Amino acid sequence: MREFTAIAQALADRQRVRLLLALQGGERCVCQLTALLGLADSTVSKHLSVLYQAGLVESRKNERWVYYRLPERPQPCVRQALKWLKDSLGDSPDARADAARLRQIVRVSPRELCRRRHKSPNQTERNKQPGAR
């Protein structure tokens, strides 16, 4: 029963559902998922933590980046939940829009995404000035 309630709670949030649908296409770096959702790093990390605790995602670290994917060998309850999610929402307009956006995002390296995301406001203003490099 604990596994079921953890999965139900994880699926009760729109942003977490979006993350799971995005991961249907394969493993993604946290910075790619953050760019997709347009939320703060800490918020996306919290959502991913809830999904991880429910067994809905797996993670691995590669240098300074953390990558998430759907589980390779999910528990039966997780497998059914992910199938239900894909069958119900996998071809929805929102899922298609996120997939199109994600195709653009993955064209940029994780290193560059992180650099862009963590650029200080002073750097951004300096780069907007004429003659700035």
Image (cartoon, helix red, strand yellow):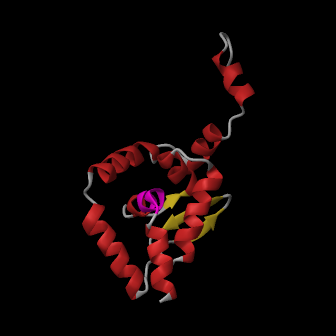
Q: Is residue 79 left or right of residue 3?
A: left
Question: Which of the 4 image quadrants contains residue 29?
Answer: bottom right
- Measuring from the top left, give residue 47's x and y in whole percent: 56, 62
Q: Find the residue positioned furthest to the top.
A: 130
Q: 6 or 96: which is nearer to us?
A: 6
Q: 84 or 133: which is nearer to us?
A: 84
Residue 9 higher or lower than 132, as above or below = below
Question: Which of the 4 image quadrants contains residue 11?
Answer: bottom left
Q: Find the residue positioned furthest to the right.
A: 122
Question: Which of the 4 image quadrants contains residue 4?
Answer: bottom left
Residue 100 higher or lower than 125, as above or below = below
- Residue at 52% of width from left, 44% of height from top? 38
Q: 73 or 51: which is nearer to us?
A: 51
- Residue at 49% of width from left, 72% of height from top? 9
- Measuring from the top left, give residue 14's x and y in whole percent: 43, 57
- Measuring from the top left, give residue 109's x and y in whole percent: 54, 46
- Residue 17 falls within the magenta-colored stretch: yes
Main SS of the magenta segment? helix
- Residue at 36% of width from left, 76% of height from top? 81
Is residue 51 visible in the rendered image? The answer is yes
Q: Which residues are magenta?
A: 13-19
